Image (cartoon, rainbow, N blue to C red):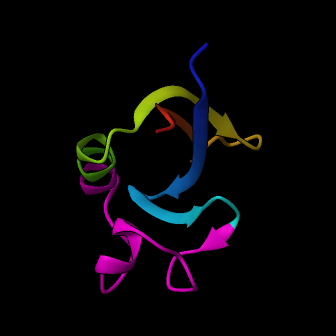
Amino acid sequence: MKNWEYLYALADNHEVFEVNGAMIGTALRGFVTTYAGRPTLTDFLNQSGQEGWELVGMSPMGEVGTTLRLIFKRPTN
C-alpha cells in the first residue's frame, strides 16, 4: 500500500501566500523559503512539481472566488 503526504496552498492575485496554514515568510521549510517575497503561482507550481508534488485538486474560496486552494500529494519514502 502506498503512503502519501499532502500539502495545501492558498493563492490570490497569482501569488501563493500560505502553505499548510503558515503564511509565506514565516518558519516554512523547503523551497518556499527560497523566495524573497511571495512566489508567483507559476513559479510555485513548477518548483513543487520538481520536488515531486502533484496537484490533485483546486477550488475557489469565498463568494467572489479570487482565492484558490491548491491541494498536492506525493508518495512518502
- Determine the residue positioned at 52% across, 76% down: 24
- Determine the residue positioned at 29% across, 78% down: 34
Kindly tell me whether residue 69 is visible in this rendering. no
Q: Does 23 sit above or below residue 26?
A: above
* Image: magenta residue range: 22-44
- Determine the residue positioned at 30% across, 47% down: 51
Q: Does 47 sit above or below residue 55?
A: below
Confirm whether the magenta stretch covers residue 36: yes
Can you tell which quarter of the image residue 61 is in?
top right
Task: Give the total of numbered labels.
Answer: 0
Give the side of residue 11 with respect to residue 32, left or right.
Answer: right
Give the side of residue 1 with respect to residue 62, left or right.
Answer: left
Residue 31 in percent (x, y) is at: 34, 67
Quadrant for the N terminus in the image: top right
Q: Nearer the viewer, residue 52 or 64?
A: 52
Residue 9 in percent (x, y) is at: 56, 52
Q: Does 45 sit above or below residue 58?
A: below
Confirm whether the magenta stretch covers residue 41: yes
Can you tell which quarter of the image residue 21 is in?
bottom right
- Determine the residue positioned at 53% across, 76% down: 28
Residue 7 in percent (x, y) is at: 58, 46
Residue 45 in percent (x, y) is at: 32, 45
Q: Nearer the viewer, residue 46 or 60?
A: 46
- Identify the residue at the far right of this view: 63
Q: Does 29 sit above or below residue 68?
A: below
Kindly tell me whether residue 16 is visible in this rendering. yes
